[in-house]
């Protein structure tokens, strides 16, 4: 069971998308997991064949529990469960594997039971045998097939999930405030060039390809991180490791409360159109279910925009194990002095909360200045 | 299309984007943003879905006219009748 968020301790496997014997390749979705962040698609990080399934649909298991065994093309066996960098070691030990562990290679199973297992597409290794010496019997196989056909035993009720999500957010934020020496910086950015460019650009685009201000902000943030890479890092043990890739965690509010911040992968390398498509897709899947496990575990920095709610300035709390969070407020018209004259201009408050163990205010200031400079040339984003 | 048909199309689109909302309680003259907690991404998706459903091209400059249920229906009707 992968650790998808820093304080996740367990998850419910709701469905397998692949079966024993299926070939899988890196990035394939092999299962669905119900977490406090909703239904998450679990990806596989290797290429091979599913050899055994160890956790059945409906089971709730601690993070770190092996869900399945995949035999790689080279013959090496790997286990499906990938921790998020910097996440705590789960308190609960991984679930004990089924009795097959006592008989490496093949489970003890009669030829008849093996034939029934193949017909019913049940992995014998995932079935607890009740026959002599723990052998898997035909009854065991048929019972496992019947159990699999049942709907998930314990779907998480929405109110429970809301409460649990609130607890998890609280725990992560308390940990952040307790452990991370935050510093906070803010700057006001003249958005007149960006807004004018955006309006002109959207006139040229079909409705399905129009851009929102958020796409410009994501791209400017991503490019500015190239200039101050220490802000794009995650803690691994006692070391903050800068990430070569820029995966922006986009804070998305969920209907009915709560939030999730899945990764917009490689944000610095995508065009504005690609970023916009990615953002739309992330928001849709965050709110309707279907985020991928890597999207929850990969962010290297978070961006939160609260301008929609009328907020002018965001004072963000860093999401561990990241080392910085960028906040954007609402674009508002304000008096702005230009060459000695006062003009009404659309402006935006950009803020940075960063980990003082990793960077200092000078570098943080350079980052915000870079965001400002990049937004003055929106056509080059 | 009749006014009722346009309104039904609008409600279908809203139901897909805000499935938790009680659309029967929708007030005709209050902005969607206020009564359905829609953000700019949702509103863009509404415009895209209305375009797909009705074939109406909606320029960005007209978004503010579509801000309320009645405003949206009036606007779509006027575009369809052109």
Image (tube, coloured by chain):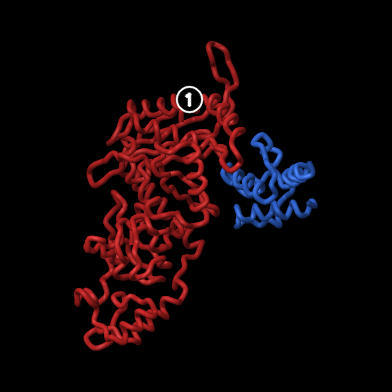
A123 relative to A94, above or below: below
Q: Which residue is mark 1?
A: A377
Position of residue A366 measured from the top left corner of the image (x, y, whole percent): 36, 26
* Chain red in the figure, letter: A
Residue drawn at x 45%, y 44% as measured from the top left: A250
Asked whether residue A365 is in view, the answer is yes
User: Splitting the image into 4 quarters, where does residue B4 fall?
Assistant: bottom right
Q: Residue furthest top?
A: A340
What secondary structure is found at the residue carrying circle 1? loop
Position of residue A18 measured from the top left corner of the image (x, y, whole percent): 39, 66
Asked whether residue A317 is in view, the answer is no
* Chain blue in the figure, letter: B
B46 relative to A114, above or below: above
Q: Is residue B27 left or right of residue A117?
A: right
User: Splitting the image into 4 quarters, where does residue A49 fall?
Assistant: bottom left
For disc 1, the chain is A
Mark 1 Cα shell of 10 Å, populated few (<14), some (14-19), many (≥20)? few
Position of residue A63 measured from the top left corner of the image (x, y, whole percent): 32, 61
Total numbered labels placed on residues in the image: 1
Q: Is residue A357 left or right of residue A197?
A: left
Residue drawn at x 27%, y 86% as measured from the top left: A110
Q: Is residue B76 left or right of residue A210?
A: right
A220 relative to B78, above or below: above
């Amino acid at each position: 069971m992968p650790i998808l968020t820093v304080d996740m301790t367990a998850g419910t496997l709701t469905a397998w998308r692949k079966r024993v014997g299926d070939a899988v390749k890196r990035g394939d979705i092999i299962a669905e997991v119900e977490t406090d962040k909703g239904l998450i698609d679990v990806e596989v990080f290797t290429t091979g064949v599913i050899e055994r399934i160890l956790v059945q649909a409906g089971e709730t298991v601690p993070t770190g529990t092996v869900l399945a065994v995949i035999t790689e093309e080279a013959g090496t066996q790997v286990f499906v469960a990938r921790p998020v960098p910097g996440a705590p070691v789960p308190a609960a030990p991984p679930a004990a594997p089924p009795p097959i562990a006592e008989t490496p290679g093949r489970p003890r199973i009669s030829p008849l039971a093996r034939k029934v297992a193949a017909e019913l597409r049940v992995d014998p290794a995932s079935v607890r045998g009740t026959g002599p010496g723990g052998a898997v019997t035909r009854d065991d196989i048929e019972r496992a097939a019947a159990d699999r056909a049942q709907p998930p035993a314990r779907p998480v009720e929405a109110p429970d999930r809301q409460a649990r999500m609130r607890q998890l957010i609280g725990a992560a934020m308390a940990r952040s405030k307790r452990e991370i020496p935050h510093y906070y910086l803010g700057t006001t950015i003249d958005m007149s060039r960006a807004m004018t460019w955006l309006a002109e650009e959207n006139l040229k685009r079909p409705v399905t390809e129009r851009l929102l201000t958020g796409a410009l902000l994501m791209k400017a943030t991503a490019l500015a991180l190239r200039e101050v890479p220490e802000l794009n890092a995650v803690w691994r043990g006692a070391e903050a490791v800068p990430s070569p890739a820029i995966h922006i965690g986009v804070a998305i509010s969920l209907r009915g409360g709560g939030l999730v911040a899945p990764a917009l992968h490689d944000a610095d390398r995508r065009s504005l159109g690609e970023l916009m498509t990615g953002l739309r897709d992330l928001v849709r899947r965050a709110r309707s279910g279907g985020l991928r496990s890597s999207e929850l575990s990969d962010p290297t920095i978070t961006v939160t925009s609260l301008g929609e709610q009328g907020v002018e300035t965001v004072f963000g709390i860093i999401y561990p194990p990241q080392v910085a969070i960028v906040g954007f407020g609402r674009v508002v018209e304000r008096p702005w002095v230009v060459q000695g004259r006062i003009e009404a201009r659309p402006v935006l408050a950009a803020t940075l909360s960063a980990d003082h163990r990793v960077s200092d205010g000078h570098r943080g200031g350079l980052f915000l200045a870079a965001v400002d400079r990049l937004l003055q040339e929106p056509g080059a984003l | 299309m009749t006014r009722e048909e346009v309104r039904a199309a609008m409600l279908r689109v809203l139901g897909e984007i805000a499935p938790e909302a009680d659309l029967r309680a929708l007030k005709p003259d209050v902005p969607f943003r206020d009564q359905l907690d829609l953000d700019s991404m949702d509103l863009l998706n509404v415009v895209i879905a209305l375009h797909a459903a009705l074939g109406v091209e909606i320029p960005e400059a007209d978004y503010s006219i579509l801000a309320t249920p009645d405003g949206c229906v009036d606007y779509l009707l006027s575009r369809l009748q052109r």
